[in-house]
Amino acid sequence: MAEGRPVRRATRGEVVRVERLTPHMIRVVLGGDGLAGFEAGEFTDHYVKLLFPPAGVAYPEPFDLAAVQRDLPREQWPTTRTYTVRAWDPVARELTLDFVHHGDSGLAGPWAARVRPGDEIHFLGPGGAYAPDPEAGWHLMAGDESALPAIAAALERLPATARAHVFLEVAGPEEEQPLNHPADAEIVWLHRGDAPVGEALVAAVRALDFPEGEPHVFVHGEAGFVRDLRRHLRAERGLPLSRLSISGYWRAGRDDESWRATKKEWNRRIEEEETALLSA
């Protein structure tokens, strides 16, 4: 879900399968003829923007987002939620998305919990910006549940001989998932319990004895711990921005709309603080 290539077109997806991966992770696989023109695969953090119409609003077919935004009042426009492409099968034309589900809170999680095969949803994309550098000395990946799909996809893309240190923070052991990864990838599951999101991730990365060679880094998830790790990696470890894919997917205490509205300013302040630290 990193901000990269802009999204361009609306695609219609039909739900073909739904699977509960863990108590709080639901997998939805989209297919159907509407995905005939969809393409993904360049990046491992590809994302799509799902379009959820307000309750009671039905759009004319074929769906045309430009027409909706031109002809209908803003309160009838669809609400967007951004999700990482966990997998794309161009032969079967199936798009796999994984959703964190915490009961009735939120928008996309409850949708994933109630959809059934045959239901449809429109989305924009894909966007994307990151894929693990096969020539990197080693790889560092860290994230919470929201980053798990992208990290899982990145692990599957790594060369068989790649070395990686991967830290994944989830609520508890019941939220762990089997992952395909190279033999030299060390996967560490961190169980949050009642601690703040990302606290264990920051501690684990700080404690890591970095191997020799320059790493390619992927750190995504809740904005607070992402900020802390960015400061650590830039100011204390001396890594250049060119070797970091780092972004706050969400922010604790904010809904998606308010976070998107303030994310640019948040990032600007982080860059100013980072500049001051590096020049001190």
Image (tube, helix red, strand yellow):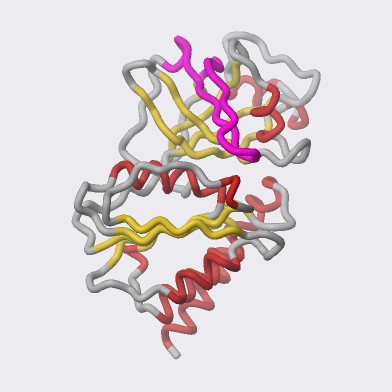
Q: Is residue 267 above or below residue 71?
A: below
Report the side of 268 relative to 128 (left or right): right
| Horizontal and vertical percent position of residue 265 | 60, 63
x 59%, y 60%: residue: 223
Closest to the observer, 235 or 59: 235
On the image, the x and y values in percent for residue 204 come to 48, 70
| Residue range corresponding to the magenta coloring | 12-35
Q: How many marks?
A: 0
Q: Residue furthest bottom?
A: 280
Residue 277 in view (yes/no):
yes
**Looking at the image, which residue is at 80% across and 18% down?**
56
79 lies above or below 132:
above
Q: Residue at x 77, y 31 (%)?
A: 75
Examine the rendered structure and indicate whether residue 270 appears above or below residue 3: below
Which residue is nearer to you in this view: 236 or 81?
236
Quadrant (top left/top right/bottom left/bottom right) for the C terminus = bottom left
In the rendered view, tell whether residue 260 sits above or below residue 190.
above
Res 26 quadrant in image: top right
Identified at 32% across, 63% down, the residue is 243
Q: Position of residue 167 (x, y in %)?
A: 46, 59
Taken as a whole, is the magenta stretch helix, strand or loop? strand
In the image shown, does 236 or 123 lie closer to the viewer? Answer: 236
Answer whether residue 55 is magenta in the image.
Answer: no
Q: Is residue 219 visible?
A: no
Residue 200 coordinates in the image, percent (x, y): 57, 67
Residue 254 in which image quadrant: bottom right
